[in-house]
Amino acid sequence: MKVKPKKGFRIGAIFIFLVVFTILSIGMGSVHLSPMETIKTIFGSGQEMSETIVWDLRIPRVLIAILVGINLAISGALLQAVMRNPLADPGLTGVSSGAAVTVLFILLIFPSFGKWIPIAAVIGGLIAVTLVYALAWKKNGISPIRIILSGIAVNAVFGGITGLLSILYSDRLPSALQWLNGSLSAKGLGDVSLLFPYSLIGWVAALFCIRPANILNLGENVAVNLGENTNRIRIVLSLIAVYLAAISVSIVGLLGFVGLIVPHMSRFLVGSNYRRLLPMSMVLGALVLLVADTIGRSLFSPLDIPAGIVMAMVGGPYFLYLMRAGDI
C-alpha cells in the first residue's frame, strides 16, 4: 500500500523537472537568456529581440521535442507490450523506416505535396507493420519472436529503398538531409499546430488501451484463459503505435532509441503496470528528447547537431549497459 504513492510521486517529480528544464532549454543556445528573462519574455515583458528568439525559434523547437518525445515513447511502450519483447521499438520493427520511405518519396519527387506528408508517413508505417504481421503470421497465430524477426527484415528492405532514393535523387538530397538525421531545427509554430492534433488523438487512444496492454503483459495463456482475443488486441495496439511513430517521423525524420530506452527507464522507475508506465513514458520521453535536442544545439554552438545524432551517441551505450545489466 505504501508503494503506489511513491511511484506516483516519481511521475510528478519527473514532470516538475520537465517544466523546469523546458524553461532552461528555451533560454539556452547561441544567444543565452537567464531563466527570469526567459519567463518575462514568455509572458510578453521581454525585449523585442528576446521575444523574436523565444517565440520564433526556441518555443516551437522545444514544443516539437516534447510532442515527438511523448509520441515515440508511447509507441515503444505499446510495441513492447504487443511483442512481449524489450527490443521492440518503432525503429527495429520497420515502422520508422516504412514511414521514412513515403516521406522521402514526397520530399524528393513530389515536394508540392508537402501538406500530405503526415498522412503519407502513416500509410508508409501501416504498410511496414502489415508486411511484418503478414510475414509473421502462421496457422497457430502470431508469435512475438516471429514479429521481431520479420520486423528486422522489413526494416532492412525499407532502409535499402531509402538509400536507393538518396542515390537516385542525390541532387535534391540536401533539402532532406536535416530531416534524415532527425533534426528539430527550423521548426515553427505551424509544425506544432500540425503535429499536436494528430498526437492528441494518438495519446487518447493509447490511454484507453491501458487495460489491453496490461492483459498482454500477463502472457498469452493467461490472456486467452480470460477470454481475450490477443490477436485483435495486438493489432489495435500496433495501429496506435504505428500512427504515433509515423506522424513523428513525418515532422522530424528518423529518431532512434527514444522508443526503446524510455519504456525501460520508466519500467525501472514505476514498474510494468501500464497504468503508471504509460504516463511515466510520456513525461520521460518528452524530457529525454528535449535534453538531447538542447545538448545538440548548445554544446557546439553555433553548430547545430541533430537530436537524432545525439540520441544515437547516448542511446547506443545506454542500450549496451542495459544488456550487460541483464535488463534486456
Image (tube, rainbow, N blue to C red):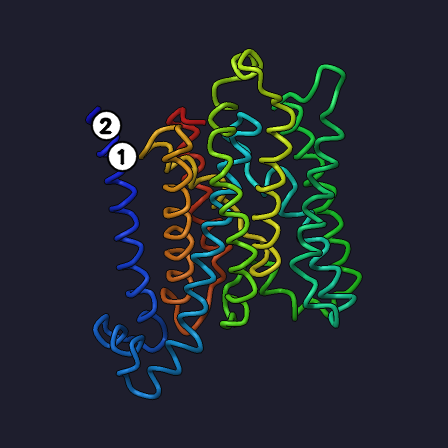
- Circle 2 — which element? helix
Label 2 and label 1: CA atoms lie apart by 6 Å
Name the amino acid type tagged 2. Val
Instruction: Tell whether label 1 touches label 2 (CB within 8 Å).
Output: yes
Between 216 and 187, which is closer to the camera in this rendering? Answer: 216
Quarter of the picture containing the C terminus is: top left
- Which residue is at a point 19% across and 26% down the rendered structure image? 2
* Relative depth, front residue between 156 and 287: 287
Residue under numbered circle 2:
3
User: Residue at horizontal 68%, vertical 67%?
Assistant: 115
Binning the other alpha carbons within 10 Å of mark 1 as few (below 14), some (14 to 19) or many (20 upward) gives some
User: Would residue 143 be found to the left or right of residue 47 on screen?
Assistant: right
What x and y, as percent, mark residue 16?
A: 26, 53
Q: Position of residue 192 (x, y in %)?
A: 50, 66
Task: Classify mark 1: helix, strand or loop.
Answer: helix
Q: Quadrant of residue 150?
A: top right
Residue positioned most to the bottom: 48
Say which quadrant the N terminus sits in. Answer: top left
In this picture, residue 230 sits left or right of residue 129: left
Write down the residue under mark 1: 7
Q: Residues within 10 Å of mark 2 (few under 14, many from 20)?
A: few
Q: Which mark is residue 79?
A: none
Q: Amino acid at mark 1?
A: Lys
